Image (cartoon, rainbow, N blue to C red):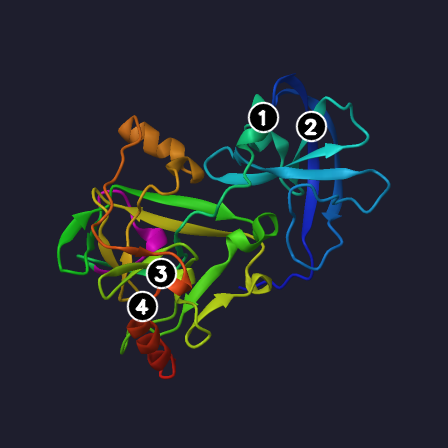
Amino acid sequence: MITRKNMATYDAGSYFSYELNSGTTFDFLEQIHSSPFTYDDNEADNTFEVGDDINSTPIVTTFLGTIIVPIAGGGTVEAMVGQFSTVAFNQRVLILPDGLDPATVTLPASIDLNDLDTSDFVTCFAKGTGIATDLGTRAVEDLQIGDTVTTADGRQVRVKWIGRQTILPRFRGDRARMVCIRQGALAEGVPNADLTVTADHGMVLDGYVVNASALVNGNGIDWVPLTDLPERFTVYHVETEAHDVILANGAASETYIDYVARSSFDNHAEYLALYGAEFAIPEMPLPRISSARQVPAFLRDRLSGQGRNAA
């Protein structure tokens, strides 16, 4: 279900102080208090940006970024890290969301400010994307390691890993923008249902790998407004042994390529437990188009015409 937002807000619950060790590293000190409070940046852009004062009281609270915290029994939560005018100058504060019992999370022993998440958004499929497999179409979130997916040229290849990343758009702004490719916007019946992907996810068209953002034309291929994104959602990427072309809602789409590190995914530890180390994936020998100005005129014109017939 889509939840609309008018401003960036964060419902805080529990607060934990970290004290400077050296450089940009802060070590866990103590829980300072647990009191529900809603932070907002008093802006209409629906997002927190690094450096924002997100506290409407005289206490200055500076947003520094977010960090992924494991939850007991599986899963993760994205926690906020800030600097408060009411704590010592050499301390930073990790804030868990309201409603989350601190006893159910594994807090980091230390926080390196350089590791806080202000990085680019992972390139992935939205939940519900139908991936062609040897057993028919399956939702991407239901795929498992070892399953077999069907490539655009009809081969069957094994799923090596499914990367997952949980997104809170209020922390990521434009980096969280998604692209919706309407049914029939790429070719007759392609995709066979609306397809939503992240901006840098590559669609394979006419011998090119084209980032979805470069395809946006307002005519069947559009940005999903940030205000239409849920407060929290998960995106998925399919990794195979090679940089393959698989079918997502019937449209040719790339599998994982390590432009974005696997460490950006929530379940990176799972990958390391399975394979012990990172493995580079050679990129398929097709030119990549990353901006709209690089899209060949013939392809742009074809998609513009196709968009008029899109559902």
Horizontal relation, residue 264 to residue 36: left or right? left
Q: Which residue is mark 4?
A: 296
Ranked by sequence position, the earlier of labels 3 and 2 is 2
- The image position of residue 173, as x and y in percent, is 58, 53
Q: Is residue 295 magenta?
A: no
> x, y (%) of residue 209?
29, 58
Neighbours of disc 2 within 10 Å: few (<14), some (14-19), many (20+): many
Question: Is residue 195 depicted above or below 97 in this figure?
Answer: below
Q: Contact (CB < 8 A) between labels 4 and 3?
A: no
Work out how far the residue at label 4 is from the one at label 2, CA to CA, in angstroms: 49 Å
Please, which residue is most extreme toward the top here? 21
The answer to whether the residue labelled 3 contacts the one labelled 2, judged by CB atoms less than 8 Å apart, is no
**Residue 127 seen in render:** yes
Amino acid carrying label 1: it is: Ile
* Numbered circle sitting on residue 111: 1
Q: CA distance from mark 4 to mark 1?
A: 45 Å
What residue span does the magenta drawing correspond to?
Answer: 136-146
| Residue linked to disc 3 | 129
Other-residue count near label 4 (Cα within 10 Å), few / some / many at <14 / 14–19 / ≥20: few
Q: Quadrant of the C terminus?
A: bottom left
Residue at horizontal 19 percent and vertical 60 percent from the top: 152
Is 57 placed above or below 269 here?
below
User: Which-is-in-front pick, marks 4 and 3?
Assistant: 4
Mark closest to the chain's N terminus, 4 or 3: 3
Q: Nearer the viewer, mark 4 or mark 2?
A: 4
Q: Label 3 sits on what residue type?
A: Thr
